[in-house]
Amino acid sequence: MPPRASKRKSAPPNSSSVTSSDGRSVSSKAKIKGLEKIDRLFNTYANSSLGMIDPEGIEALCSDLGVDYTDVRILMLAWKLKAEKQGYFTQDEWQTGLKALGVDSLSKLKKALSDLEKEVCCNGYYNHCKVIF
């Protein structure tokens, strides 16, 4: 005897389980697309033989952002990216840091630099930094 069909309605899919035609969830596709944009941005400035953004890449990034490479906001960016080596950003540091900042484009990075400056100046970090530097 075949099993009885359930009279209960299945629960509607929630946003985290909505899938696209290729079987991936929509939210994971958006995350992958964001990561691809972050990686493209990284590759624009990275030294391909080193596999990281080096001082020349940072200088090019600064030029595209319209800031001087000696601008303190670049130091703040390195701090937010948790860069381990001065003047260099690894791909992992770049991905993790930009995701944390909610950045996946040059225009968003420019805005994030402005926000970082406000964060540092408004939270009393600025006076602390003046003592150190």
Image (cartoon, grey):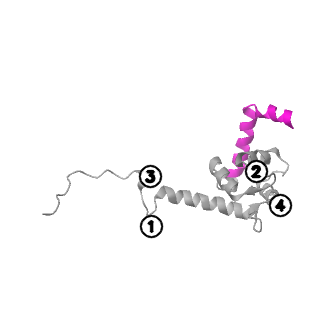
Q: Which mark is residue 56?
A: 4
Q: In the image, what residue type sits under mark 4?
A: Glu
Q: Which residues are magenta?
A: 108-133
Which amino acid does the dot numbered 1 rest on? Answer: Asp
Dots 4, 3 in contact, CB < 8 A: no
Q: Which mark is residue 114?
A: none
Q: Residues within 10 Å of mark 3 (few under 14, many from 20)?
A: few
Badge 4 density bin: few <14, some 14–19, many ≥20, Cα 10 Å: some
Residue 84: which numbered mark, if any?
2
Quadrant in the picture for residue 65? bottom right
Q: Earlier in the sequence, mark 2 or mark 3?
A: 3
User: Is residue 63 magenta-colored?
Assistant: no
Q: Is residue 117 magenta?
A: yes
Q: Earlier in the sequence, mark 1 or mark 2?
A: 1
Q: Neighbour class for label 1 at 10 Å: few (<14), some, many (≥20)?
A: few
Number of numbered callouts drawn = 4
Q: Which mark is residue 16?
A: 3
Q: CA distance from mark 2 to mark 3?
A: 35 Å
Q: Residue drawn at (20%, 52%), measured in percent from left and top?
A: 7
Secondary element at image label 2: loop
Please report whichever mark, 2 or 4, sits nearer to the chain's N-terminal start: 4
What is the C-alpha distance between the residues marked 1 and 3? 15 Å
Whichever of labels 4 and 3 marks the residue nearer the N terminus, that label is 3
Residue marked by disc 1: 22
